[in-house]
Image (tube, rainbow, N blue to C red):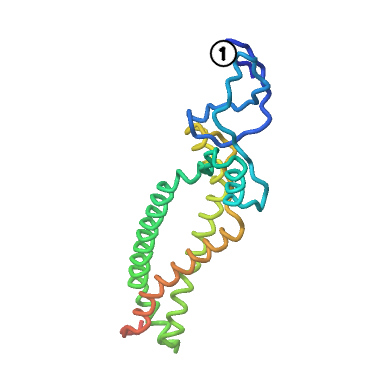
């Protein structure tokens, strides 16, 4: 990359990247030794990258002790921490969408059971107990739930990285930061979605299994 710093032309080679939301992500970090003497102003601060397992508080105390309290040591703010308010909005949106989905599922289950009242009467006439009838109704709904959750999870896992990278590119942070959820996270999400849907479908199924449905011979 060719650029000019303080009137001095400079050619730098990009060897890495850090997530920097300031200046729309258009920030370049170079060493002082890469600049001409007239352009190499004294640094305003030093950034330290701690080794894995290092205690930030312990390092801060040692730096203050070595400088005799002459340094102002502060922990660097993780850019992701600035998105905490967005996380709250996303969680609230997911909760609202979950309630809407469960309400739709409850309504669809109730209407489906009402349309299949004759089938319910046949099941009871065959000698099925209310518990068996309820299990049959929940199983029918559960198959649709598993199919819907499976397709939704497959589509989501295939586009989540692309969507995150697209947002990062448009916001100036840059692409390449998207990460798909881990297998454990995805499995837990699928199990919670299916379990919650089955629990909601159990409400109309229990009511229908206990109801007295008249049987008319044909």
7 vs 114, left or right, is right
Nearest the viewer among 152 and 211 is 152
Left or right: 1, with 200 as reference point: right
Please identify the quarter of the rendering in which residue 28 is found.
Answer: top right
Instruction: Give the structural element (helix, strand or loop) at label 1.
Output: loop
Where does label 1 land, which residue?
6
Visible in this render: residue 179? yes
- In the image, what residue occupies the spot 41% across and 86% down? 130
Q: Residue at x 52, y 42 (%)?
A: 74
Position in image of residue 65 (x %, y %): 60, 45
Q: Nearer the viewer, residue 43 or 143?
A: 43
- In the rendered image, is residue 216 in sight? no
Q: Is residue 114 left or right of residue 35?
A: left
Instruction: Report x, y in % for residue 85.
Output: 40, 47
Vertical side of 11 occupied by 18: above or below: below
Residue for point 40% across, 77% down: 119
Q: Residues within 10 Å of mark 1 (few under 14, many from 20)?
A: few
- The image shows a total of numbered marks equal to 1
- Name the image quarter holding the N terminus: top right
- Identify which residue, 134 or 28, lies in the foreground: 28
- The quarter of the picture where the C terminus appears is bottom left
Q: Is residue 197 above or below residue 150?
A: below
Q: Position of residue 151 (x, y in %)?
A: 53, 55
Q: Residue at x 38, y 58 (%)?
A: 95
Q: Is residue 169 left or right of residue 103?
A: right
Residue 211, relative to residue 179: is it above or below? below
Name the residue nearer the viewer: 192 or 54.
54
């Amino acid at each position: 990359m060719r650029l000019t710093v303080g009137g001095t032309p400079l050619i730098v080679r990009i060897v890495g990247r850090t997530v920097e939301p300031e200046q729309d992500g258009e920030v370049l970090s170079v060493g002082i030794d890469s600049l001409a003497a007239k352009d190499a102003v004294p640094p305003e601060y030093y950034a330290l990258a701690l080794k894995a397992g290092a205690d930030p508080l312990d390092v801060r105390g040692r730096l203050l002790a070595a400088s005799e309290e002459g340094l102002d040591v502060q922990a660097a703010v993780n850019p992701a921490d600035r998105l905490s308010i967005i996380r709250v909005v996303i969680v609230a949106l997911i909760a609202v969408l979950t309630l809407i989905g469960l309400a739709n599922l409850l309504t669809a289950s109730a209407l489906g059971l009402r349309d299949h009242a004759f089938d319910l009467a046949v099941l009871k006439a065959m000698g099925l107990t209310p518990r068996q009838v309820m299990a049959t109704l929940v199983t029918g709904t559960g198959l649709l739930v598993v199919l819907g959750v499976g397709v939704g999870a497959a589509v989501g896992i295939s586009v989540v990285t692309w969507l995150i990278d697209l947002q990062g590119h448009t916001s100036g942070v840059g692409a390449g930061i998207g990460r798909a959820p881990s297998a454990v996270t995805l499995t837990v999400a699928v199990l919670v979605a299916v379990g919650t849907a089955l629990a909601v479908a159990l409400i109309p199924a229990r009511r229908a299994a206990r109801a007295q449905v008249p049987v008319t011979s044909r």
